[in-house]
Structure formats: structure tokens, C-alpha cells
Image (cartoon, helix red, strand yellow):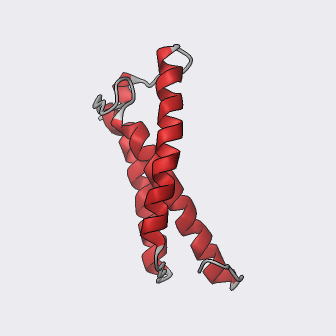
Amino acid sequence: MAHLHYVGVLLFIGLCAVGVSVGFSLKIPGFWKTFILTDICILLIYLAWDFWAISKHNWYFDSKQMLNIFPIPKVPIEEILFFIVVPLTTIVTYKTLLKLTKWKSSNR
């Protein structure tokens, strides 16, 4: 079961985001197009950095705690999912705080 640690953390974070968005009835019109375009930029930058850091032996992943699936050479699937799940969770948290505090947002 150790090979599921990293995926388990991502799953927990993702489920929390889904729970918050459902629990607070968040409606985010036009959100997905903006999120996908922005996240593609994030993925390109950080996955290139990951690949470089792993190649230079400055960064590594514990193969015992991963699925050992590498869609990008040397970069595990969990790392790719990290750069999708965490930004998504951050935005959901931000939108929830806007709703709870009734702060104004120009992009609501």
C-alpha cells in the first residue's frame, strides 16, 4: 500500500475541494476554460523544471510511494496530477472564501 501514499494525498486534497464546492454550492461560470488554459502554462513551466531537476539529481521521488507510471520521462504521474489538483483546490478555496466573507471579486 505504500505505493499509494502520494496518490492518496492528492485524492484527499481533491475530495476536500469537491466537498467544499458542493457544500457551499459554488457556481463558477466560465471557470473551466480559464483554469485549463492557465494550468497548461503551469504544467509546462513546472514539469520542465521537474524534468531538469530530476535529470541533474537535484530532485527525486521515492519509487516505493508511487505508482511508477511516467507519462513524461523521469516525471511520475503523481507529479503531473499535483500540478492540476493543487491549483484547482486553491481556486475552489479562494471562491469559497469570497462567498463566505461576501467580498467582491471582479471575476465572479
**Of 23 and 44, the residue lying toward us:** 44
Q: Is residue 37 visible?
A: yes
**Of 19 and 29, the residue lying toward us:** 29
**Of 95 and 13, the residue lying toward us:** 95
Tell me the quarter of the picture where residue 2 sits.
top left
Q: Is residue 98 above or below residue 94?
A: below
Report the label total: 0
Quadrant of image for the N terminus: top left
User: In percent of the image, x 43 and y 67: which residue is there?
Assistant: 33
**Residue 107 falls left or right of residue 54:** right
Quadrant of image for the C terminus: bottom right
Task: Give residue 5's position: percent from left, percent from top.
Answer: 39, 38
Task: Give residue 15's position: percent from left, percent from top.
Answer: 40, 62
**Residue 97 falls left or right of residue 29:** right
Q: Is residue 80 above or below residue 39?
A: above
Task: Give residue 88's position: percent from left, percent from top.
Answer: 49, 59
User: In percent of the image, x 53 and y 37: which residue is there?
Assistant: 46
**Of 3 and 60, the residue lying toward us:** 60
**Residue 41 falls left or right of residue 65:** right
User: In percent of the image, x 61 and y 77: which residue is there?
Assistant: 107
Task: Give residue 75's position: percent from left, percent from top.
Answer: 39, 29
User: In percent of the image, x 67 and y 79: which residue is there?
Assistant: 106
Q: Is residue 6 visible?
A: no
